[in-house]
Amino acid sequence: MCTAILGLQPGAPVLLAGVRDELADRAWQPPRRHWPGYPELIGGRDLLAGGTWLAVAPSARRAACVLNGRGTLAPARSRRSRGVLPLQAAAEGKLGQAGLEDFDPFHLLITEPGRGSLASADGQDLTERDLAAGLHMIVNGGLGSDLLAAGASGPGTAPHTGRDHELARVAHFLPRLRAVPRPAPRSGGPASRAWEDWLPLVDGDGITPDDPRALIVRRDLGDGRIWGTTSISLVALWPDAVRYDFTGTPGEAAAWRPVPMA
Protein backbone atom coordinates (compact mmCIF):
# COMPACT_ATOMS: atom_id res chain seq x y z
CA MET A 1 0.00 0.00 0.00
CA CYS A 2 1.26 3.45 -0.84
CA THR A 3 -1.12 5.91 0.86
CA ALA A 4 -3.41 5.74 3.88
CA ILE A 5 -5.80 8.48 4.99
CA LEU A 6 -7.22 8.45 8.50
CA GLY A 7 -9.94 10.70 9.92
CA LEU A 8 -10.33 10.77 13.71
CA GLN A 9 -13.01 12.92 15.31
CA PRO A 10 -14.57 12.53 18.78
CA GLY A 11 -18.11 11.23 18.62
CA ALA A 12 -17.85 10.40 14.92
CA PRO A 13 -16.91 7.23 13.06
CA VAL A 14 -13.28 6.55 12.22
CA LEU A 15 -12.73 7.01 8.48
CA LEU A 16 -9.93 5.08 6.76
CA ALA A 17 -8.89 5.11 3.11
CA GLY A 18 -6.23 2.71 1.90
CA VAL A 19 -4.68 3.11 -1.55
CA ARG A 20 -2.63 0.12 -2.70
CA ASP A 21 0.17 0.55 -5.25
CA GLU A 22 1.78 -2.61 -6.60
CA LEU A 23 3.00 -4.32 -9.75
CA ALA A 24 -0.03 -4.69 -11.99
CA ASP A 25 0.55 -8.39 -12.60
CA ARG A 26 0.89 -9.33 -8.93
CA ALA A 27 -2.15 -11.54 -8.35
CA TRP A 28 -4.62 -10.84 -5.58
CA GLN A 29 -8.16 -11.63 -4.48
CA PRO A 30 -10.79 -9.07 -3.42
CA PRO A 31 -11.77 -8.64 0.24
CA ARG A 32 -13.43 -11.48 2.09
CA ARG A 33 -12.54 -14.00 4.81
CA HIS A 34 -9.48 -15.69 3.30
CA TRP A 35 -7.47 -16.88 6.33
CA PRO A 36 -8.36 -20.01 8.35
CA GLY A 37 -5.95 -18.82 11.04
CA TYR A 38 -7.88 -15.53 11.25
CA PRO A 39 -11.46 -16.57 10.46
CA GLU A 40 -12.94 -13.27 11.64
CA LEU A 41 -10.81 -11.01 9.45
CA ILE A 42 -11.81 -9.55 6.08
CA GLY A 43 -9.38 -8.15 3.56
CA GLY A 44 -7.89 -8.47 0.12
CA ARG A 45 -5.45 -11.36 -0.21
CA ASP A 46 -2.08 -11.13 -1.91
CA LEU A 47 -1.64 -14.46 -3.70
CA LEU A 48 2.15 -14.24 -3.87
CA ALA A 49 2.80 -14.04 -0.12
CA GLY A 50 -0.64 -14.89 1.29
CA GLY A 51 -1.08 -11.83 3.48
CA THR A 52 -2.92 -8.54 3.02
CA TRP A 53 -2.39 -4.81 2.79
CA LEU A 54 -5.50 -3.97 4.83
CA ALA A 55 -7.49 -6.11 7.27
CA VAL A 56 -10.80 -5.42 9.00
CA ALA A 57 -12.01 -7.17 12.16
CA PRO A 58 -15.78 -6.51 12.11
CA SER A 59 -16.61 -7.77 15.60
CA ALA A 60 -13.74 -5.80 17.16
CA ARG A 61 -14.56 -2.70 15.06
CA ARG A 62 -10.88 -2.52 14.15
CA ALA A 63 -8.81 -2.10 10.98
CA ALA A 64 -5.10 -2.20 10.22
CA CYS A 65 -3.09 -1.47 7.10
CA VAL A 66 0.58 -1.60 6.18
CA LEU A 67 2.71 0.56 3.89
CA ASN A 68 6.24 -0.05 2.73
CA GLY A 69 8.75 2.12 4.56
CA ARG A 70 12.35 3.09 3.84
CA GLY A 71 15.54 1.96 5.50
CA THR A 72 17.57 -1.21 5.97
CA LEU A 73 16.14 -4.36 4.42
CA ALA A 74 15.70 -7.51 6.49
CA PRO A 75 18.19 -10.36 6.02
CA ALA A 76 17.22 -12.38 2.96
CA ARG A 77 17.52 -15.68 4.83
CA SER A 78 14.88 -14.70 7.41
CA ARG A 79 12.76 -12.10 5.59
CA ARG A 80 9.00 -12.38 6.11
CA SER A 81 6.19 -10.75 4.17
CA ARG A 82 4.88 -7.53 5.69
CA GLY A 83 1.41 -8.74 4.68
CA VAL A 84 1.11 -10.66 7.95
CA LEU A 85 1.32 -7.46 10.02
CA PRO A 86 -2.22 -6.15 9.31
CA LEU A 87 -3.64 -9.58 10.12
CA GLN A 88 -1.92 -9.72 13.49
CA ALA A 89 -2.74 -6.10 14.30
CA ALA A 90 -6.41 -6.28 13.30
CA ALA A 91 -6.83 -9.46 15.36
CA GLU A 92 -4.90 -8.30 18.43
CA GLY A 93 -5.12 -4.52 18.33
CA LYS A 94 -1.37 -4.01 18.56
CA LEU A 95 1.94 -4.65 16.83
CA GLY A 96 3.68 -7.77 18.02
CA GLN A 97 7.23 -6.98 19.12
CA ALA A 98 8.85 -10.35 18.40
CA GLY A 99 10.72 -10.87 15.15
CA LEU A 100 10.41 -7.35 13.76
CA GLU A 101 13.96 -7.60 12.41
CA ASP A 102 12.62 -10.08 9.84
CA PHE A 103 10.44 -7.48 8.13
CA ASP A 104 11.56 -4.89 5.61
CA PRO A 105 10.83 -1.28 6.68
CA PHE A 106 7.15 -0.55 7.18
CA HIS A 107 4.47 1.76 8.54
CA LEU A 108 1.60 -0.01 10.30
CA LEU A 109 -1.60 1.92 10.97
CA ILE A 110 -4.07 0.50 13.51
CA THR A 111 -7.42 2.11 14.19
CA GLU A 112 -10.69 1.55 16.02
CA PRO A 113 -13.35 3.96 17.31
CA GLY A 114 -11.66 6.74 19.25
CA ARG A 115 -8.11 5.58 18.54
CA GLY A 116 -5.45 5.54 15.85
CA SER A 117 -1.80 4.56 16.16
CA LEU A 118 1.13 4.41 13.78
CA ALA A 119 4.16 2.14 14.14
CA SER A 120 7.13 2.83 11.85
CA ALA A 121 10.18 0.59 11.52
CA ASP A 122 13.20 1.39 9.36
CA GLY A 123 15.22 -1.77 9.97
CA GLN A 124 17.08 -0.17 12.86
CA ASP A 125 14.54 1.61 15.06
CA LEU A 126 10.84 1.26 15.84
CA THR A 127 8.74 4.35 16.53
CA GLU A 128 5.18 4.09 17.84
CA ARG A 129 2.82 7.01 18.30
CA ASP A 130 -0.83 7.67 19.01
CA LEU A 131 -2.45 9.94 16.45
CA ALA A 132 -4.39 12.99 17.59
CA ALA A 133 -7.87 13.86 16.44
CA GLY A 134 -7.87 15.24 12.92
CA LEU A 135 -7.07 14.14 9.40
CA HIS A 136 -3.83 12.29 8.70
CA MET A 137 -2.07 10.98 5.59
CA ILE A 138 0.61 8.32 5.66
CA VAL A 139 2.86 7.61 2.67
CA ASN A 140 6.04 5.57 2.22
CA GLY A 141 8.08 8.42 3.67
CA GLY A 142 5.96 8.46 6.85
CA LEU A 143 3.34 10.71 8.39
CA GLY A 144 2.31 13.45 6.01
CA SER A 145 2.49 16.21 8.61
CA ASP A 146 6.13 15.30 9.22
CA LEU A 147 6.88 15.53 5.51
CA LEU A 148 5.19 18.92 5.25
CA ALA A 149 7.12 20.21 8.26
CA ALA A 150 10.42 18.99 6.81
CA GLY A 151 9.60 20.48 3.40
CA ALA A 152 8.70 23.82 4.96
CA SER A 153 12.11 23.96 6.66
CA GLY A 154 13.75 24.44 3.29
CA PRO A 155 16.56 22.57 1.58
CA GLY A 156 19.50 21.64 3.73
CA THR A 157 17.76 22.37 7.03
CA ALA A 158 16.12 18.99 7.59
CA PRO A 159 16.75 15.40 6.51
CA HIS A 160 14.98 14.30 3.33
CA THR A 161 12.11 12.20 4.68
CA GLY A 162 10.12 11.52 1.52
CA ARG A 163 10.18 11.81 -2.22
CA ASP A 164 8.98 14.97 -3.91
CA HIS A 165 5.87 13.29 -5.32
CA GLU A 166 4.82 12.18 -1.82
CA LEU A 167 5.17 15.70 -0.50
CA ALA A 168 3.19 17.03 -3.48
CA ARG A 169 0.46 14.42 -2.89
CA VAL A 170 0.12 15.26 0.80
CA ALA A 171 0.23 19.01 0.12
CA HIS A 172 -2.62 18.67 -2.39
CA PHE A 173 -4.93 16.12 -0.77
CA LEU A 174 -4.80 17.06 2.91
CA PRO A 175 -6.25 20.56 2.34
CA ARG A 176 -8.74 19.21 -0.19
CA LEU A 177 -10.05 16.57 2.22
CA ARG A 178 -10.18 19.03 5.11
CA ALA A 179 -12.15 21.51 3.01
CA VAL A 180 -15.09 19.20 2.23
CA PRO A 181 -17.79 18.08 4.68
CA ARG A 182 -16.86 14.98 6.63
CA PRO A 183 -18.98 12.05 5.36
CA ALA A 184 -21.19 9.92 7.60
CA PRO A 185 -21.08 6.70 5.56
CA ARG A 186 -23.27 4.55 7.79
CA SER A 187 -26.20 5.23 5.51
CA GLY A 188 -27.03 2.44 3.11
CA GLY A 189 -26.84 2.60 -0.62
CA PRO A 190 -23.92 3.04 -2.98
CA ALA A 191 -20.47 4.29 -2.03
CA SER A 192 -21.06 7.56 -3.86
CA ARG A 193 -23.93 8.42 -1.52
CA ALA A 194 -22.29 7.04 1.62
CA TRP A 195 -18.90 8.72 1.20
CA GLU A 196 -20.19 11.89 -0.44
CA ASP A 197 -17.44 14.44 -1.18
CA TRP A 198 -14.67 12.11 -0.07
CA LEU A 199 -15.23 9.63 -2.87
CA PRO A 200 -14.19 11.73 -5.91
CA LEU A 201 -11.10 12.88 -3.99
CA VAL A 202 -10.05 9.39 -2.93
CA ASP A 203 -10.85 8.22 -6.46
CA GLY A 204 -8.12 10.51 -7.80
CA ASP A 205 -9.61 14.02 -7.86
CA GLY A 206 -9.32 14.02 -11.65
CA ILE A 207 -5.51 14.17 -11.53
CA THR A 208 -3.66 12.25 -14.23
CA PRO A 209 -1.40 9.37 -13.12
CA ASP A 210 1.78 11.14 -14.23
CA ASP A 211 1.10 14.25 -12.14
CA PRO A 212 3.45 14.54 -9.10
CA ARG A 213 0.38 15.04 -6.90
CA ALA A 214 -1.38 11.91 -8.12
CA LEU A 215 -3.02 9.56 -5.63
CA ILE A 216 -3.81 7.04 -8.37
CA VAL A 217 -0.58 6.32 -10.21
CA ARG A 218 0.67 4.26 -13.14
CA ARG A 219 4.27 3.86 -14.24
CA ASP A 220 5.90 1.84 -16.99
CA LEU A 221 9.02 0.25 -15.47
CA GLY A 222 10.12 -1.32 -18.76
CA ASP A 223 10.34 -4.98 -19.75
CA GLY A 224 6.55 -5.16 -19.73
CA ARG A 225 6.29 -4.29 -16.03
CA ILE A 226 3.61 -1.82 -14.94
CA TRP A 227 3.47 -0.47 -11.41
CA GLY A 228 0.50 1.48 -10.16
CA THR A 229 -2.64 1.73 -8.06
CA THR A 230 -4.45 -1.60 -8.07
CA SER A 231 -7.19 -1.03 -5.48
CA ILE A 232 -8.67 1.41 -2.98
CA SER A 233 -10.49 0.60 0.27
CA LEU A 234 -12.78 2.84 2.31
CA VAL A 235 -13.62 1.75 5.87
CA ALA A 236 -15.81 3.42 8.50
CA LEU A 237 -15.81 2.19 12.10
CA TRP A 238 -18.40 2.90 14.80
CA PRO A 239 -18.61 1.28 18.24
CA ASP A 240 -21.49 -0.84 16.91
CA ALA A 241 -20.99 -1.07 13.15
CA VAL A 242 -18.55 -1.27 10.24
CA ARG A 243 -18.83 -0.19 6.62
CA TYR A 244 -16.27 -1.31 4.03
CA ASP A 245 -16.30 -0.24 0.37
CA PHE A 246 -13.78 -1.40 -2.22
CA THR A 247 -12.75 -0.90 -5.82
CA GLY A 248 -10.32 -2.87 -7.91
CA THR A 249 -10.63 -0.33 -10.72
CA PRO A 250 -9.44 2.95 -9.19
CA GLY A 251 -10.72 6.05 -10.90
CA GLU A 252 -13.97 4.50 -12.13
CA ALA A 253 -16.79 5.79 -9.93
CA ALA A 254 -19.18 2.98 -10.92
CA ALA A 255 -16.70 0.26 -9.89
CA TRP A 256 -17.10 0.73 -6.12
CA ARG A 257 -18.80 -2.12 -4.22
CA PRO A 258 -19.69 -2.66 -0.55
CA VAL A 259 -17.87 -5.55 1.12
CA PRO A 260 -20.25 -7.86 3.05
CA MET A 261 -19.49 -7.97 6.77
CA ALA A 262 -21.51 -11.13 7.49
Image (cartoon, rainbow, N blue to C red):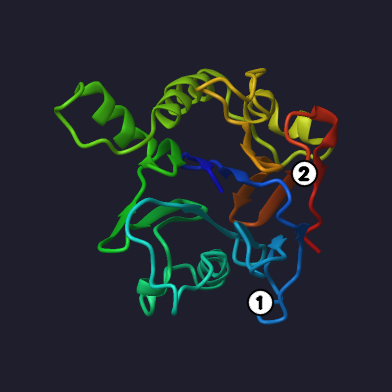
Residue at 47%, 52% (x, y): give it: 68
Along the line of sight, which residue is nearer the eye, 57 or 46? 46
Q: Estimate how packed mark 2 is, as few (under 14), some (14 to 19) or many (20 or more) residues with alpha carbons within 10 Å.
A: some
Q: Establish if 66 lies above or below 187.
A: below
- 1 vs 2, front mark: 2
In which quarter of the view is residue 103 placed?
bottom left
Report, in whole angstroms, how far the alpha carbon at label 1 lies from the one at label 2.
Answer: 23 Å
Element at badge 1? Answer: loop
User: Label 1 sits on what residue type?
Assistant: Tyr
Along the line of sight, which residue is nearer the eye, 72 or 68? 72
Q: Estimate how packed mark 1 is, as few (under 14), some (14 to 19) or many (20 or more) residues with alpha carbons within 10 Å.
A: some
How many marks are shown on the rendered structure? 2
- The x and y percentages for residue 93 are 48, 68
Element at badge 2? Answer: loop
- The x and y percentages for residue 258 are 80, 46
Residue that mark 2 sits on:
248
Residue at 39%, 53% (x, y): give it: 118
Residue at 47%, 39% (x, y): give it: 9
User: Label 2 sits on what residue type?
Assistant: Gly
Which is nearer the N-term, disc 1 or disc 2?
1
Q: Establish if 34 lies above or below 175.
A: below
Along the line of sight, which residue is nearer the eye, 156 or 36? 156
- Residue farthest to the front, as pictured: 223
Residue at 56%, 72% (x, y): give it: 91
Residue that mark 1 sits on:
38
- The x and y percentages for residue 162 are 35, 36
Along the line of sight, which residue is nearer the eye, 56 or 70? 70
Q: What quarter of the picture does the C terminus occupy?
A: bottom right
Left or right of 146, for residue 67: right
Numbered mark located on residue 182 in the image: none
In which quarter of the view is residue 53 placed?
bottom right
- The x and y percentages for residue 233 are 67, 45
